[in-house]
């Protein structure tokens, strides 16, 4: 005879949470103790299974070289930068910010069209009004380019760093501080998950004074000032 022990659903949920908490604690410990060699080894393991899809970082490198040839100042943000400053996870698009002063959108449009096939019908409107270029690389990967011009975005580019992803040349990525700022402003569910991982992996190395100095006025501009406190509480909890 098979015996089944009936437990209260709340008790069952509580037991499940213990398991989740243990898994989370292990994940946090691995992130906090991760060495550069361990990071690079994990990066290759995760991304090595993506064939026959074009290799993500190689595609980003070819895009970087093409942008440099056009004299475009930029840095990678989003999922690509997260690979270094947070937890390694698969991502699809290549996101970056390129500097384009007001009034120079038409020139930027021509440069980007020579590199990336547009995937938006009225790409001229998108670039000149929304200041965004949505393109496709020759390998078929989406690339989302935000055209920056604010003082913050220019400072972000100055703070950007070359990151060695184990390919022939490093990729220019935003700093971990700026990735935190961008993800807090975006504030979607996955962004807060990513923020926790950035805190776990890189939090002790971050200049948090710089983060909040830049972030607070930007959140006031976007009418989301409460997110600064949300981030402070997350840092206090997870760091």
Image: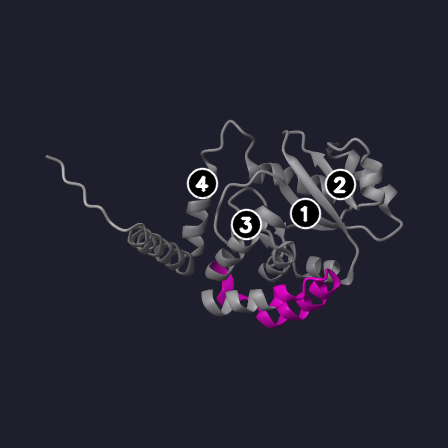
Badge 4 marks a residue whose secondary structure is helix
Dot placed on the residue nearer the N-terminal end, 3 or 4: 4
Mark 1, other Cα within 10 Å: few <14 / some 14–19 / many ≥20: many
The residue under label 3 is 190
The residue under label 2 is 133
Badge 2 marks a residue whose secondary structure is strand
Picture disc at residue 63: none
Mark 3, other Cα within 10 Å: few <14 / some 14–19 / many ≥20: few
Classify residue 133 as left or right of residue 10. Answer: right
CA–CA distance in space, label 3 to label 4: 19 Å
Dot placed on the residue nearer the N-terminal end, 1 or 2: 1
CA–CA distance in space, label 4 to label 1: 22 Å
Query: Magenta span has 207?
Result: yes
CA–CA distance in space, label 3 to label 2: 23 Å
The residue under label 1 is 96
Residue 183: percent from left, percent from top: 61, 55
Q: Quadrant of residue 231?
A: bottom right
CA–CA distance in space, label 1 to label 2: 10 Å
Task: Say which of 192 and 2 sits in front.
Answer: 2
Residue 124: percent from left, percent from top: 84, 37
């Amino acid at each position: 005879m098979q015996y089944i022990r009936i437990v209260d659903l709340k008790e069952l949920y509580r037991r499940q949470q213990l398991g989740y908490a243990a898994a989370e604690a292990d994940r946090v410990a691995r992130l906090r103790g991760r060495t550069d060699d361990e990071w690079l080894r994990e990066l290759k393991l995760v991304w090595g299974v993506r064939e026959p899809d074009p290799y993500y970082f190689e595609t980003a490198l070819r895009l970087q070289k093409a942008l440099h040839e056009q004299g475009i100042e930029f840095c990678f943000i989003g999922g690509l930068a997260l690979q270094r400053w947070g937890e390694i996870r698969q991502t699809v698009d290549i996101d970056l910010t390129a500097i384009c002063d007001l009034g120079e959108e038409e020139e930027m449009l021509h440069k980007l069209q020579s590199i990336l096939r547009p995937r938006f019908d009225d790409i001229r409107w998108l670039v000149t009004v929304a200041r965004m270029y949505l393109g496709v690389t020759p390998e078929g990967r989406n690339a989302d380019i935000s055209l920056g011009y604010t003082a913050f975005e220019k400072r972000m580019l100055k703070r950007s760093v070359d990151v060695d992803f184990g390919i022939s040349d490093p990729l220019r990525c935003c700093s971990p501080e700026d990735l935190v700022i961008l993800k807090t402003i975006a504030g979607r569910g996955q962004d807060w998950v990513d923020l926790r991982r950035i805190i776990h992996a890189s939090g002790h190395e971050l200049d948090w004074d710089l983060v909040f100095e830049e972030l607070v006025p930007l959140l006031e501009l976007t009418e989301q000032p409460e997110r600064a406190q949300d981030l402070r509480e997350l840092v206090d909890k997870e760091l």
